[in-house]
Amino acid sequence: MVKPERRPNRPHFSSGPCAKRPGWSLDALRGAAVGRSHRSVVARARIQEVLDRSRSILSIPDDYRVGLVPASGTGAVEMALWSLLGPRGVEVLAWESFGEGWVTDVEKQLAPGDVRIRRAEYGTLPDLGAVDFARDVVFAWNGTTSGVRVPDGDWIPASREGLTICDATSAVFAMEIDWPKLDVVTWSWQKVLGGEAGHGILALSPRAVERLESHTPAWPMPKIFRLTAGGRLDEGVFRGDTINTPSMLCVEDALDGLRWAESQGGLAALIDRSRANLAAVTGWVEKTSWVELLARDPGTRSSTSICLAIADPWFRALDSAAQSAAAKRVVALLEEDDVAYDVGGYRDAPPGLRLWGGATVETADLEALFPWLDWAFAEIQRS
């Protein structure tokens, strides 16, 4: 097969950290409050602006607290688990790697007692109709490593006894989030907005705040997880103060991403951009025999972390080690020609490819990539 001539303008298809917004350059950071205390008026104002713009774009309910916390989306989820679990039984939903990570934390690290795990294999969801909302429920809105998302929030009752704790890091800014159905929502800037990593956002409903103020965890609480002081919510975390020192360069970059989102038309436009990317990939897959989407149900396919399984009989006849090596060779060929970076499937997922389709990726770049994917697969078959 002849090597294609047309190349993506930007070969950045990583699922995290993700592509910067179109037109980004280091000039976007020129106004950063570097060299200033994060407690200074100017730095606190920048942090608060991130929280305010996020709330506005996402239409987060007015009575939800939104704060900047340490350690990216992972740190935000850990903070919620350590701070809130214990008073009720817990259900954890896992259908990919990050969900399994929360299983480990809840079941083996915190071990609050009454824990139930609902699992599904890569490409599918657990039975959402069987979830018991008298318990606290922990789940990811979008399975970043499987390309499978929950279809909506209709499976969550508006009236529930337990809390819903949602890892939404690869969903926020690209998918419609049913905020009233969620008591804790976490995400990071490094996904749909293409921001720099290391910082997380934590949104809490009034029910989550009530739990924080009425429950004392049975385990020691690390300083970076503490959201209360003297039995009351530490409101400073949700007013521009932070538990530890944030990078003001990263804060400035997050502001740039948020302003770009507003310039595109806000959340609806970001969702449309991501859906267009999924549609382009789906169209290519439907006419390509060697590949298929890992997510089996079109209604639960992620528009951000689009995971591809290699379906060619030659590939499937290989043993698992040879499949993994072949998939890695496809990824290496694409990177060698600077047409796609970091598109390998997640290390715990079935061998395959993963294309980020979030709002900062241009559909035209994906369309330019498809012939290269065909070429790279033909090359590994020939070698």
Image (cartoon, rainbow, N blue to C red):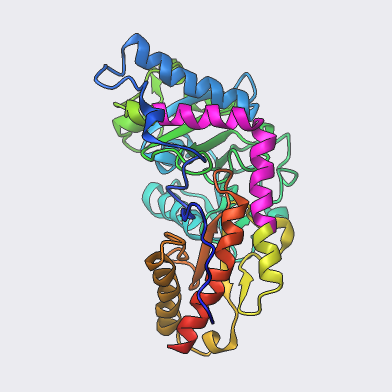
The image shows residue 43 at horizontal and vertical percentages of 35, 16
Identify the image quadrant of residue 326.
bottom left
Residue 173 lies in magenta, yes or no? no
Eyeballing the image, is 255 above or below 125?
above
The residue furthest front is 5
* Residue 217 appears in the figure: yes
Vertical side of 36 occupied by 303: above or below: below
Residue 297 lies left or right of residue 308; in this view the side is right
Q: Residue lying farthest left?
A: 35
Residue at 71% x, 73% y is: 287
Residue that appears at 32% across and 31% down: 224
State whether residue 237 is above or below residue 362. above
The residues colored magenta run 252-279
Image coordinates of residue 153 in percent, x first then y, are 71, 43
User: Can you see residue 147?
Assistant: no
Question: Main SS of the magenta segment?
Answer: helix
Of 121 and 36, which appears nearest the observer? 36
Q: Where's the C terminus, which quadrant?
A: bottom left
296 to the left or right of 310: right
Q: Quadrant of the N terminus?
A: bottom right
Q: Position of residue 102 (x, y in %)?
A: 46, 51
Q: Indicate left or right for 136 with 133 as reference.
A: left
Number of marks in the rendered image: 0
Choose between 252 and 114: the one closer to the eye.
Answer: 252
List x then y, in percent, for residue 95: 56, 60
